[in-house]
Image (spheres, coloured by chain):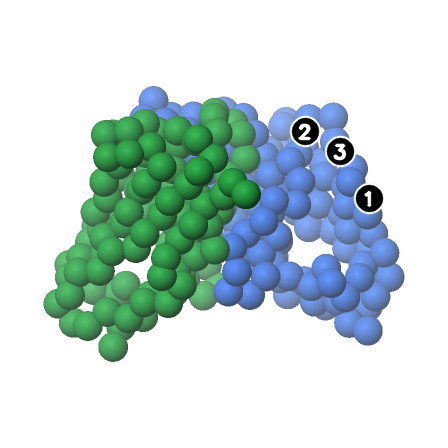
Amino acid sequence: RKEVEQDPGPFNVPEGATVAFNCTYSNSASQSFFWYRQDCRKEPKLLMSVYSSGNEDGRFTAQLNRASQYISLLIRDSKLSDSATYLCVVNFARNTGNQFYFGTGTSLTVIP
Amino acid sequence: DGGITQSPKYLFRKEGQNVTLSCEQNLNHDAMYWYRQDPGQGLRLIYYSQIVNDFQKGDIAEGYSVSREKKESFPLTVTSAQKNPTAFYLCASSPGPYEKLFFGSGTQLSVL
């Protein structure tokens, strides 16, 4: 079983649409959670951290449900520039150190 | 500006050849990581290091080797034992437990 599971999409949405991505994780001891954005052949860049109380940054809202072990990302009023792959990342500590686990990514294309 | 520098951006390997990918950071982070990304797949952990002179194998360490002689540097060697090395390699660092990952710009390795 994979540590982190994401729907790979692709999601093709018109400009201005609202789109939501979900991600599930298997390790209940996971401590921190992130959404990263990755453009083609580029490095991932942090979009936002995800907190238990949920958090918002402009058009982006992230939610964490520890009981069900899933995190979500909501993008409102989609822009063409939002087209990218969105990676769900989960972090927990092993006795050998701090490790990060990545979902396969969800591809989003915003259409004019 | 602080950050992570990976070089080269593109690298070509001949059959039976070892090649080394460079990763340098000036963020004063203790933890450093190497990931491999294949098309349509998530990032997979090759090796990680929590402290100088110590490193741990990740999920796909076979055919790779690393060293951590300095806090700033974490080079990755792709050995001839790695039979399918073509991939996008990403180096990352983190300031501490449960903190976010910072990425270098990546190295695309291809086989001639």
B76 on left or right of A90:
left
Q: Secondary structure at mark 3?
A: strand
Q: Residue B59's quadrant in the figure?
A: top left
The amino acid on which the numbered mark 1 sits, given as a three-letter code, is Gly
Drawing shade for chain A: blue
- In the image, which disc is placed on residue A51? 2
The reply to whether dot 3 and dot 2 touch (C-beta < 8 Å) is yes
Label 1 Cα crowd, 10 Å radius (few <14 / some 14-19 / many 20+)? few
Instruction: Determine which residue is flagged by label 1.
Output: A58
Q: Quadrant of residue B38?
A: bottom left
Position in image of residue A80 (x %, y %): 77, 66
The residue at 74%/26% (across/down) is A53
Determine the residue positioned at 72% across, 36% down.
Answer: A63
The residue closer to the viewer here, A81 or B3, is B3
Q: For mark 3, does the 10 Å Cα neighbourhood hold few (<14), some (14 to 19), or many (20 or more) residues?
A: some
Q: Secondary structure at mark 1?
A: loop
Which of labels 3 and 1 is toward the front?
1
Which quarter of the rendered picture does the C terminus of chain A lie within?
bottom right
Q: Position of residue A1 (x, y in %)?
A: 42, 44
Of the image marks 2 and 1, the number of the one nearer the N terminus: 2
**To which residue does mark 3 refer?**
A55
Q: Nearer the viewer, residue A27 or A85?
A: A85
